[in-house]
Image (cartoon, helix red, strand yellow):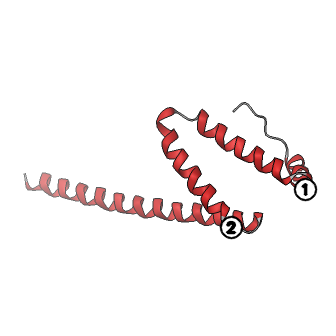
């Protein structure tokens, strides 16, 4: 990333004095993050960014936007956890099958 991140106090001041400038800065940082990612990851990051922006557009306040973002992250982590559990179950089953097959020989 080419843009240095201002400290927290500067961001708070910007939010209070010019919320639209803070929003522009936020979008710029996100855009830069996507563009600096490896080429093969950009399409999925673009889709993720679009989902986030769509969800944020329904927020009625910055706090509401944060709650929406938190819920999206929580749902994503829950899905990741469920997928991991299923994969581990399948691997355990495969290992069991291989072990039983070896013991039969």
Q: Give the image location of residue 85, x and y in percent.
A: 39, 62
In the image, residue 75 sits, relative to residue 105, either above or below, namely below
Q: At numbered mark 2, what does the secondary structure look like: helix, strand or loop?
A: helix
**Mark 1 neighbour density, 10 Å: few (under 14) some (14–19) many (20 or more):** few
Describe residue 18's horizontal placement relative to residue 62 as left or right: right
Q: Quarter of the image for the N terminus: give it.
A: top right
Mark number, residue 42: none
Describe residue 96's horizontal placement relative to residue 22 as left or right: left
Q: At numbered mark 1, what does the secondary structure look like: helix, strand or loop?
A: helix
Task: Kindly indicate the quadrant of the structure image that contains residue 83.
Answer: bottom left
Residue on which the image places disc 2: 67
Residue on which the image places disc 1: 16
Describe residue 97's horizontal placement relative to residue 34 as left or right: left
**Residue found at x 91% / y 51%:** 13
**Mark 2 neighbour density, 10 Å: few (under 14) some (14–19) many (20 or more):** some
Q: Residue furthest left?
A: 105
Q: Give the image location of residue 77, x and y in percent.
A: 53, 61
Is disc 2 in contact with disc 1, using a CB cutoff of under 8 Å? no
In the image, residue 89 sits, relative to residue 19, either above or below, namely below
Describe residue 26's horizontal placement relative to residue 70 as left or right: right
């Amino acid at each position: 990333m080419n843009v240095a991140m201002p400290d927290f106090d500067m961001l708070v001041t910007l939010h209070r004095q010019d919320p639209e400038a803070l929003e522009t800065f936020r979008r710029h940082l996100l855009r830069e993050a996507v563009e600096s990612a490896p080429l093969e990851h950009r399409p999925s990051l673009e889709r993720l960014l679009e989902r986030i922006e769509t969800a944020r557009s329904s927020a009625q306040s910055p706090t509401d936007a944060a709650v929406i973002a938190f819920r999206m992250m929580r749902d994503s982590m829950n899905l990741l956890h469920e997928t991991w559990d299923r994969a581990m179950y399948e691997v355990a089953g495969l290992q069991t099958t291989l072990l039983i097959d070896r013991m039969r020989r």
